[in-house]
Amino acid sequence: MSRTLLCLAVLLSLLLPATLPRAGQKTPVTTKAAAKADSGEPKYSSVEERRLLVALQQERQNLVNERQALELKKKELKRLQAEVDKKLDQLKQERLRLEKLLAEKDAAEQKRIRELSKMYEKMSPAKAARIFADLDQDLAISLLANMKTKAAAKILNNMNGDAAARLTTAFSSLDGK
């Protein structure tokens, strides 16, 4: 019997190290938690830990969603900014075109006023004075401003005193017209 015990002890010493884990090696676990870990599900040590991890995952997903929404809004803002810049350029071009048209209109109007002034200079002062009395004050002033001083004086001399005074006052208060 001692011989049998000795054989068993030798066999156990040979077999036992093969079944025990080596240094740094994990022992095989056959619990439900180990089965969950192998299945890809996270293992939790407590309900509170599980609740916190789920909340963190939800917060992480919310942040990802917010980033995506922000990126979409940035793209939309860039598109809108490009549209606004395009519209501003169009408005600038339109403003320049209108300014050019107004300058042309003003130049044509000034040319007509100079021509009318020459015509009134050639008229008799009495006839021109009667017409000037019925003209719009701004037009009359523009015509007088484009006439030679001598011709303008003769026309004002032939006008009614009140009308001549009004034209003279308005003419004297011109701001560089």
Image (spheres, rainbow, N blue to C red):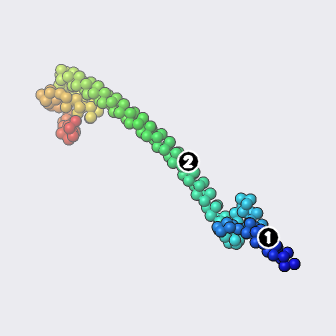
Residue position for label 1: 11
Quadrant housing residue 165: top left
Q: What whole-number distance in Å separates the C-alpha atoms at marks 2 and 1?
A: 71 Å
Q: What residue sits 12% from the left and 28% below the top?
A: 150
Q: Looking at the picture, how far across and down is residue 86, in whole percent?
A: 44, 37
Secondary structure at numbered mark 2: helix
The residue closer to the viewer here, 75 or 102, is: 75
Label 2 amino acid? Leu
In the picture as drawn, the residue positioned furthest to the right comes out as 1
Q: Looking at the picture, how far across and down is residue 4, in whole percent?
A: 85, 75
Q: Is residue 77 left or right of residue 171?
A: right
Report the mark closest to the observer, 2 or 1: 1
Q: Residues within 10 Å of mark 1 (few under 14, many from 20)?
A: few
Q: Is residue 133 visible?
A: no
Q: What residue sits 74% from the left and 59% below the top?
A: 39
Q: Quadrant of the C terminus?
A: top left
| Lower position in the chain sequence, tag 2 or tag 1 | 1
Q: What residue sits 50% from the left and 42% below the top?
A: 79
Q: Looking at the picture, how far across and down is residue 62, in whole percent?
A: 61, 58
Secondary structure at numbered mark 1: helix
